[in-house]
Amino acid sequence: MLHYDIVSYLNPKECAMPKVGDEYREEVKTRVILAALDVFSRNGYHNTKMDDIAKKASVSKGTLYNHFSGKEELFRGIAEFLFKKEMTLCEAMFTENDPVQSFRIMFDGISKLYEGKTGFLSEIFSLVERDEKMRAILSEAFAKEVEGFAQIISKMQSKGTIRQDIDPSSFAILLMALYMGIFMCRRMFDESLLREQDLMDIGLRSILFER
């Protein structure tokens, strides 16, 4: 079973780097992104001020604006940051021979990535319905995620471990929809009504293998 060191990039204190040049700049940028992720999760996008993020990240407003021109650019930065982390988890699937187990490991890793940050995901679903700019940013991030995921699926198809009669991009969207659907059900309904393990396994086996 794979072990994911999620804490190392969800806890700013664990992300410390030597405070020199580009490395320090990247460390500060990551700290700002993590702070914004936390504040957006608690307050919502529209109720958050750049001052709130600067305070949470323990940086000056000048430093904050050196990295991001405003909330919109910062939101895009969060989307890109999370995309890279999700792709790292996806690539780790190849250490498992059982494709169902591989995808479960990936989804478990993504769940840990968003642990304590589910408010941000709820905010995303709300924003795409009423804010065209945010919808465009998130659509761009989703397209990149589908592309990256599809490349991994294509490699698995080449290995013969999963069915080969579905276009990799469509395959990626189906699997992402399965995960997001179960995630939203967990948020909306009593979890005792859900047999998440069974739902995930049934869904994965239905999608991954030909009958």
Image (cartoon, helix red, strand yellow):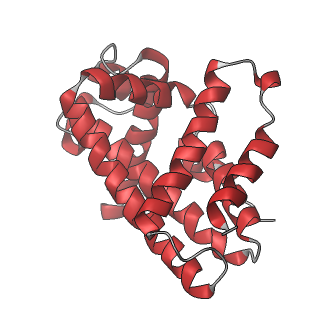
Q: Is residue 64 above or below residue 201?
A: above
Q: Is residue 101 left or right of residue 123?
A: right
Q: Camera-side residue: 4 or 171? A: 171
Residue at the top extreme, as displayed: 47
Q: Camera-side residue: 164 or 37? A: 164
Residue at the front extreme, as displayed: 211
Residue 9 visible in the current orientation = yes
Q: Is residue 120 left or right of residue 128?
A: right
Residue 64 visible in the current orientation = no
Q: Is residue 126 above or below residue 110?
A: above
Q: Position of residue 4 (x, y in %)?
A: 69, 58
Residue at (61, 35) in percent of width and height: 183
Q: Is residue 41 above or below residue 166?
A: above
Q: Camera-side residue: 49 or 145? A: 145
Q: Is residue 97 left or right of residue 61?
A: right
Quadrant in the picture for the N terminus: bottom right
Residue at (70, 76) in percent of width and height: 95
Q: Position of residue 200 (x, y in %)?
A: 72, 47
Residue at the bottom extreme, as displayed: 159
Q: Position of residue 202 (x, y in %)?
A: 75, 51
Q: Is residue 77 left or right of residue 1?
A: left
Residue at (63, 28) in percent of width and height: 185
Q: How many marks?
A: 0
Q: Position of residue 32 (x, y in %)?
A: 38, 39
Quadrant in the picture for the C terminus: bottom right
